[in-house]
Amino acid sequence: MSVLMTVSDMSVGGAERMVAQLTVALHERGRETVVAAAPGPLDADLEAAGIERELLPRGSRSPLRAAAVVGALARVTARVSPELVHAHNPRIAASSAIAARVGRPLARPPVLATFHGVLPSEYGVAARLLRLADHVVCVSAEIAHTLERSGVRGERLSVIPNAVEAVEPLNPERRAALDSELGLGEAPVFSIVARLVPQKAHERFLEAARIVAESHPETRFLIVGDGPLRAQMEGLAGELNLGDQVLFTGVRADARDIIARSRALVFSSNWEGLSVAALEALSAGVPVVSTDVEGMREMLGSGAGVMVGRDPAELAAAITRLIERPDDAEQMGTIGRELARTVYSPPAMAAAYDELYDGLIAAR
């Protein structure tokens, strides 16, 4: 049974990484898969696994660009003749649903959408777009409840968490190399791995770093990623006199190693879905410290990390606790590693989607 997987592009975002991971896992289970998306760095993962690719134009909120994406998807759908279309996030899901009707009007395949979350203010628009799909998977129960309240019927919703490949512990040689390159020494390290965009609220992380640095000046804070707010955040770090305590690394292919080197992975976000980086931290036995946002509560309710309010002082207090009480960090890490192994594993995710695909295809 063939599946056409659609996503806006194959960049290094959480949803795109999940697409690559799920597609490879399904391929290994014998499910024929084709990915339709604009190009991006994660194409290398698909190519290595022998996944067939169909290129789409880059979309935008412009009606002309959106129409171009729908047209391209309709042609791909007609050519591939999938038994099911699996789209990721609202706009590409709506485009895929329209394209399925145009590309195969006499034998339209069912359209499944996976919803990774949006700004709270955008749930209404997301629900209207997602109603074009036959079924919607949410990556957490909280997100599903919010989407249902926004207008998607509960019987058309399922919950399948994202997953993560096991993260190997850092060996001493790799740790020493990272410490030397980044100038870390034996310092406790707290990292944030995310695009520098308003959603992630890096300014809250920097304000917390300033507070922690007053009592623990040896601590190092790593900001891994890039984005339109990088220059602004670098300027703020200077204004806060953080000096060498904060390092902007840019995008790193070894982000997993940096997470594994950290005392905790920090999220200062205004909103989140179910972050793949957070799952990588759990797999590495690294606690997660996060603002209290939808998508993270369910995961951290297990004891694998700490939830705090949006006041930088609360974030700083959680970080300070893990500096002063390393046994707490170790205990949280043990819980997280077991959670990643059992609940958030790629085989479990692929099996859940496989079963859902079969049900939707049979119903059609």
Image: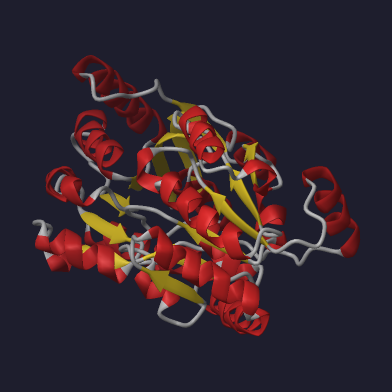
Can see residue 29? Answer: no
Can residue 183 be seen in the rendering of this structure? yes
Q: Residue 281 at x, y = what percent? A: 59, 64
Q: Position of residue 49 (x, y in %)?
A: 66, 45
Image color mode: secondary structure
Which residue of the protein is positioned furthest toward the top in this rendering?
Answer: 64
Q: Is residue 26 left or right of residue 8?
A: right
Relative depth, front residue between 252 and 94:
252
Q: Is residue 254 above or below residue 311?
A: above
Could you tell me which residue is drawn at 30 percent across and 60 percent down? 137
State the image coordinates of residue 327 (x, y, percent, origin top left): 66, 84
Foreground of the two, 134 or 129: 129
Q: How many marks?
A: 0
Q: Is residue 114 above or below residue 62?
A: below
> Which part of the image, by quadrant, shows the C terminus?
bottom left
Residue 180 location, x and y as percent? Answer: 86, 48
Q: Residue furthest right?
A: 173
Residue at 39% x, 47% y is: 201
Q: Nearer the viewer, residue 86 or 142?
A: 142
Residue depicted at 65% across the width and 67% down the height: 263
- 263 above or below 257? below
Q: Is residue 187 above or below residue 247?
A: below
**For residue 77, what is the image quadrant?**
top left
